[in-house]
Amino acid sequence: MKKFILRLFTLHFALFFSTNLTFANINQTISNAKLEKNSVASISVRDVQTSKELYARNQHKYVHPASSLKIFTFAAALNELGEDYTFDTKVYADNSGNLYIKLGADPLLCTEDLRALIKQVKSSFDTSKIKNIYIDDTIIDKIPYPQGWMWDDFWPNIPKLSPYTLNQNTTKLTLRLAREGQSAQVIQNDPYKISIINEVTKGSARNIALHKDYDENSDIITIKGTVSGDSTVFVPVSNPKFYFIANVDDILAREKISYKKPYAIAKVPKNAREVAKVSRSIQEVGAYALKNSDNFSSEIIFKVAGGKFKGKCEGGSTQDALDMFFNYYSKLGADVDGVKISDASGVSRYNLFTTSWMSDALLFLNSTNVKNYMAQAGEGTLDRRLVHLKGRLWAKTGTLSGVSSLAGYVKNSKDKELVFAVVISNFNKKPSVIKSFEDDLVDDIFKF
């Protein structure tokens, strides 16, 4: 009996010592980072099996989650849409020779998809008898940006949100160096043209910056900087609808389908028959959104799911999706009273969460498939980060000016699964320095 008690005491002491040693490691890592005096490191780590919070620091302070928010908004959207959901772009025909392009808000719809769609129409419908072409764009609303988005945060990295999503509402520019001299020529092969003030010259490396006045409807872009060789730049378009129509017109002409009338907006009539369809799965779109931290895809998915949640046949909005978000997490058992959220991607400066809430929500989400959509170590936004934890780490990064975050799941050195949420706020260091600090923290967490 005495031996048993001694062994039990020894085991308890060893666990206590090991845990406290890990705490000391994390605290030392934070100390070594030499964050500014006013910076905040908010951290919460929990055991998946017991739900116990193993380590916490400033876990109840409000912080901005940045793109780590995508985990939680996508999980709510996936629950609403289902694993079998597809983003369908369809063409219907009625008995009068009219065609209807039904937009499905596919965030990854590209020119090749549109070309395939029109080729299907050509093979299943007598295109010489087209009377009118209508567009049904009712799947989501046309509000281009959620509340709390700051121009410097999102342009030119995030195009306008719209039911029109072709090529993520960006146009491709090619910068080509002149054979002689120091100038670079801008080439536009896209049927949708923009006005460009070209200030790009030859240099030792690519260093390009896009500038635009604050009239969001203007298509006048200034390109400044240097290139050392031919280079490609993608620029958000000011009018996604016109951009979509310009590309439809171009493909129709290439397919020798004559249509010279304007495109009207109308819902697909009930008696119309489907003549063409291109689809993309939620698995492909969701993985792209989370692994690559794609803001455009995240926001579009959120709106589509919000519309479905509200039982709408049209016009899914960010507000619909926010209602869906609160309903979903309330039903899971998460306390949403203190959550402040304005978008799906984490760009809005109005978003406020605690890392305690984030780690708690990750516990609830462990029973879902959301982890399958997240980047593993060494891929997506975790490329070249924590590669030694490949197969043991699934996480979502986040970056805004003065904010860096990392949240997800890690299977530790003892094969115990943990959840963690780390948010670093109000720093004045290079983001790469903070990312390295986050990686050190995850290594410490791995040793729990």
Image: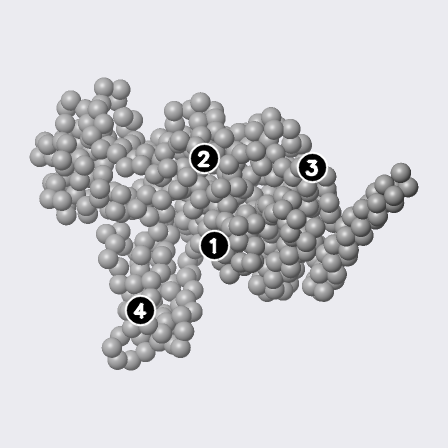
Q: Which residue is disc 3 drawn over?
A: 51
Out of 15 and 235, give the one closest to the viewer.
Answer: 15
Q: Identify the residue shown where x is 38% and y is 63%.
A: 222
Q: Position of residue 303 (x, y in %)?
A: 45, 35
Left of 48 or right of it: where is 211? left
Upstream in sequence: badge 2 or badge 4: 4
Q: Identify the residue shown where x is 31% and y is 75%.
A: 183
Instruction: Classify mark 3: residues with Cα within 10 Å, few (<14), some (14-19) or many (20+).
Output: some
Q: Amino acid at mark 4?
A: Asp
**Residue 329 falls in which quadrant of the image?**
top right
Is the residue under label 4 in contact with that under label 1 (CB below 8 Å)?
no
Left of 425 or right of it: where is 135? left
Q: Amino acid at mark 3?
A: Ser
- Give the mark toward the camera: 3 or 2: 3
Out of 85 and 1, give the one closest to the viewer.
Answer: 1
- Compute the Cα span from label 1 to label 3: 28 Å
Instruction: Classify mark 4: residues with Cα within 10 Å, few (<14), some (14-19) or many (20+).
Output: some
Instruction: Classify mark 1: residues with Cα within 10 Å, few (<14), some (14-19) or many (20+).
Output: some
- In the rendered image, the residue lying farthest to the bottom is 181
Out of 406 and 400, give the one closest to the viewer.
Answer: 406
Q: Secondary structure at mark 4?
A: loop
